[in-house]
Image (tube, helix red, strand yellow):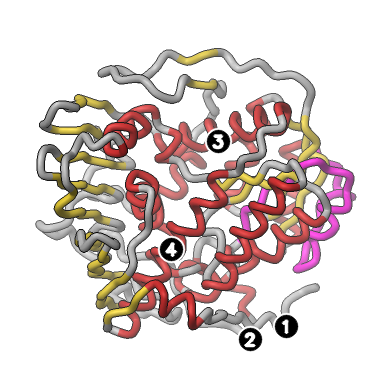
Amino acid sequence: MNPPNHFSRRKFLGTALASSAVASVVSTVRSRAADEAPAAVPLKVGRKIKVGQVGCGGRGSWIADLFKQHGGYEFVAVADYFAERAEKTGAALGVAKAKCFSGLSGYQRVIESGIEAIILETPPYFFPGHAAAAVEAGLHVYMAKPVAVDVPGVLRIGALGKTATAKQRVFLVDYQIPTDPFHIEIRKRIVEGGLGKLNMIYSSGKYGNDNGFSDPPPGASIENRLVDFIWCNDDALGCGYIGNFDLHIIDAVVWALGRRPVSAHAMGGRFRGDPHGDALDTYVVTYAMDDGVAWSHQSAVGPVNDWLKMALEASIQGSGASARLSYFQRVYVRGGAMHYPGGKQDDMYKGGACQNISDFYQNVLAGNCGNDTAERSVDSTLTCILGREAARRKTLLTMDELLKENKRLEVDLKGLKA
């Protein structure tokens, strides 16, 4: 994608839904110092993996279609809180109606349906519990991000990744930027000291000209907040805006540097129209790394601002060179002995997901259970929560303080269908 300034977050999250067809999935060579993207290598598909899915909303149904197009998966069961969504997605995947489950307990029935692997695409509040049940049942796990909404949930996911490794099960979190060959090469050069001594990091999350997600008044229960990304407006249900959108670039910086910040000083606000959820949608966060390097992260809703024109970008500044990371634009290392002209993936959203689906398949068949994405998701999600909590309190907050608090966010599930 090369989005114009009016490209909205909602369009970003739903862009693939408008496509009439999905391109064939390919497995790509993952690192190469060149101006052009690596040549695609045809994917070899062996046996089909029996898979089930929990969460059949917009992105869930899109991901399910990519799994189907891959050719290496056989869908056995699906579940969604809403029966009509489960049945619609199930029909598209060739799942028998009797294996299309609904309600809060639908995920358990998918786990018990005879599958080998599970795809988790629900509001993130439910991820730790669903993932725990899947790992306990001996399933391979493919899940969306953010992996949790609070510190206890994030730490639980980290532990589950290690348990999955011990059980020789794959646990993959679907981040797209680290699958991109250009970013892989840039990270390699950063790790090898190609930027010199790090001086400063800048990043942008959400940008202007988009007033956020629909945020209607709550009903008698939270049922009306389980659809259409409305849950992004609630910290306890969806981890907030910084955890759902900004996480892409925050994860990329943490991945590129190989470490998370030690503190954050932040402010933020709610500027979307008539907000009812408690999530902030605008942030100015100054993270500090353990060596004193400052990382400035900014994100906003509303009209386009001169100071923030592109979404999901980062500039890592060093004494000898700088590196640019981006979800949508060209990326590179500029200056120094390890200058790299880089390039741009045309559609990171779909391309990264397809690569992860391919990797998941190959890892399951080969028994590759290192599960590095689960481990990294702990650092990147904690970084988002640190920024979110510092902004809510309008203060300086250290990572150690956040971890010591170990604050759990609760959601009132009363009135929902079991």
Mark 4–mark 3 distance (CA, rounded to whole Å): 20 Å
Instruction: Residue under label 3, please give it.
Output: 356
Q: Which mark is residue 220?
A: 2
In screen coordinates, is 297 left or right of 102?
Answer: left
First-in-chain label (1 vs 3): 3
What is the C-alpha distance between the residues marked 4 and 2? 26 Å
Sequence-first tag of 4 and 3: 4
In three-dimensional space, the C-alpha distance between marks 2 and 3, rounded to whole angstroms, equals 39 Å
Q: Amino acid at mark 3?
A: Asn
Residue position for label 1? 415
Instruction: Report if the CB atoms under discs 2 and 1 are less than 8 Å apart.
Output: yes
Q: Secondary structure at mark 4?
A: helix
Q: Which secondary structure lies at badge 1?
A: loop
Say which of 400 and 269 sits in front.
Answer: 400
Q: Position of residue 312 (x, y in %)?
A: 30, 50
- Between 177 and 75, which is closer to the camera in this rendering? 177
Q: Amino acid at mark 2?
A: Ala
